[in-house]
Amino acid sequence: MQNSLQAVEAFICLGSNMGDTDGNLARAVEAISALEGVSLEAASGVYRTEPQEKKDQAWFANQVIRVSCDARTSPETLLASLLNIESSMGRCRDGSAPEDRFGPRIIDLDLLLFGSSVMATETLVLPHPRMQQRAFVLIPLHEIAPELTFPDGKTLLQALNALQFRLVGDQIWQ
């Protein structure tokens, strides 16, 4: 786990494709920054990304942020806070329909990495299990942490090079 004297770096992916998407991302970043024991360290630009899985919906606005978490913050408490922020912004994660998993959402906050933590519980898997398959995660992550190495030893650049995608300005197709 984490050393009680040192802050832990965590990465969070934000996404929105309903309403004021840029405003939704900004509100979520502000709410995350206000969490006790969490400080915003860096934020990528906002990318417009083609929907994955369920294509017949609006494109997403995506962003990745890096936060520093003090010893009071565990991966589980950070995730719980992210889910509370989603809920307060109007996201309903009831799972009533399987297709909704990839459907439209006002806000989506995914904990990608929490230091070098590797874990799998009923509620949390770290590193995020699909992160290395998603250009909309890796491109903004590369913007704020180009030298990142995943806990499995793969570099961020290796993961990006393994994907087929197209980046034009701030638009990502995959």
Image: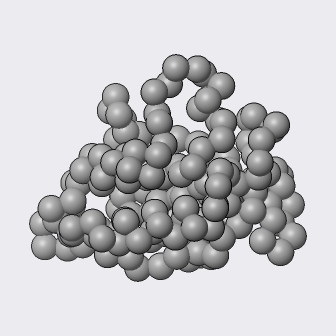
Count how many numbered circles sit on residues in the image.
0
Residue 126 vs residue 50, the one in the foreground: 50
- Residue 38 appears left or right of 24: left
Which of 29/79 is in front?
A: 29
Q: Is residue 96 above or below residue 82?
A: above
As displayed, is residue 9 above or below residue 90? below
Q: Residue at x 65, y 41 (%)?
A: 104
x and y percentages locating residue 10 in the rendered image: 38, 64
**Where 162 falls versus 87 (above or below)?**
below
- Whether residue 29 sits left or right of residue 74 in the image: it is right
Specify whether 121 is left or right of 36.
right
Query: x%, y% of residue 4?
Result: 12, 66
Q: Quadrant of residue 166?
A: bottom right
Q: Position of residue 19 (x, y in %)?
A: 65, 55
Q: Is residue 166 visible?
A: yes
Residue most toward the bottom? 41
Quadrant of the rendering where the N terminus is positioned: bottom left
Q: Residue at x 52, y 70 (%)?
A: 26
In the image, what residue occupies the spot 21% across and 69% down? 37
Colour scheme used in the picture?
one colour
Rendered residue at 41%/79% (across/down):
41
